[in-house]
């Protein structure tokens, strides 16, 4: 899913529009890091990628963004934290955004344990994408399923269950997945993208599931 960065301001000859005093230390730090960490074969690729310019972004959070994976929280707090995450994910869907997509695989998800904050918020929204920019229904369905799995994984982590062990005997993981899906479905409301509505209503009858299976097989 391509992103349009044409509106990003760049100054000729500068790696980013930063205060003048900050540029030299940043360049020196980046150069030292590349020399210390990158292999000889990798340096040419870094030079090629950097030739088009470098960018950075800064985001604001109203408090210290204490992420779940950085904290030691007990299961008693899971209900409070999960309500905040689910409410926020539903707000994004109602506003026409997907919390995450396949584009963010290995890049991070805002609702994952590394970005979900203990106060019920998300610390990094880089994975959020407008639903209107995704043309294929199957890609929207995949993004919604990824959102459910990412939220469920975060909740399971808070419950002290490291990662998914979803199998025939793991009823806790099954219940958390069902809980996340049901909460999002109820919170989305009626005025949402038709494909989101189709995804969440798919379990109402077998005919709908068959139709979605056909979409998945065709890649539409």
Image: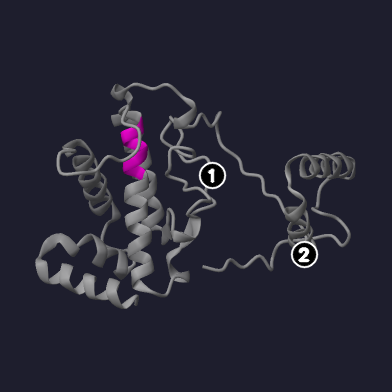
- Span shown in magenta: 151-157
Disc sitting over residue 52 in the figure: 2
Along the horizontal axis of the image, is 22 left or right of 181? right
Along the horizontal axis of the image, is 145 left or right of 58? left
x, y (%) of residue 102? Answer: 44, 60
Relative to 188, say whether 124 is above or below.
above
Along the horizontal axis of the image, is 138 left or right of 22? left
x, y (%) of residue 151? Answer: 35, 44
Task: Determine the residue positioned at 29% across, 55% down.
Answer: 188
Task: Determine the residue positioned at 11% across, 72% down.
Answer: 207
Quadrant of image for the C terminus = bottom left
- Return the residue found at the far front: 40
x, y (%) of residue 181? Answer: 25, 50
Task: Determine the residue positioned at 48% across, 70% down.
Answer: 133
Dot 2 crowding, Cα within 10 Å, few <14, some 14–19, many 20+: few
Q: Which residue is mark 1?
A: 124
SS state under label 2 = loop
Task: Determine the residue positioned at 43% across, 30% down.
Answer: 118
Q: Is residue 202 magenta?
A: no
SS state under label 1 = loop
């Amino acid at each position: 899913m391509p992103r349009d960065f044409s509106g990003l301001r760049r100054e000729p000859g500068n790696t980013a529009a930063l205060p003048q005093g900050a540029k030299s230390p940043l360049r020196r730090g980046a150069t030292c890091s590349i020399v210390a960490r990158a292999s000889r074969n990798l340096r040419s690729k870094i030079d090629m990628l950097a030739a088009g310019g470098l960018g950075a972004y800064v985001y604001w959070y109203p408090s210290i963004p204490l992420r779940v994976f950085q904290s030691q929280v007990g299961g008693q707090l899971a209900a409070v934290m999960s309500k905040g995450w689910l409410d926020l994910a539903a707000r994004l869907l109602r506003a026409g955004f997907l919390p995450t997509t396949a584009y963010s695989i290995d890049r991070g998800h805002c609702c994952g344990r590394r970005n979900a904050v203990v106060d019920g918020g998300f610390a990094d929204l880089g994975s959020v994408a407008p639903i209107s920019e995704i043309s294929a229904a199957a890609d929207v369905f995949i993004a919604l399923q990824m959102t459910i799995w990412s939220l469920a994984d975060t909740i399971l982590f808070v419950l002290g269950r490291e990662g998914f062990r979803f199998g025939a005997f793991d009823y806790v993981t099954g219940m958390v997945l069902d809980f996340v899906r049901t909460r999002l479905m109820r919170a989305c409301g009626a005025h949402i993208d038709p494909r989101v509505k189709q995804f969440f209503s798919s379990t109402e009858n077998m005919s709908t599931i068959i139709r979605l299976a056909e979409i998945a097989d065709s890649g539409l």
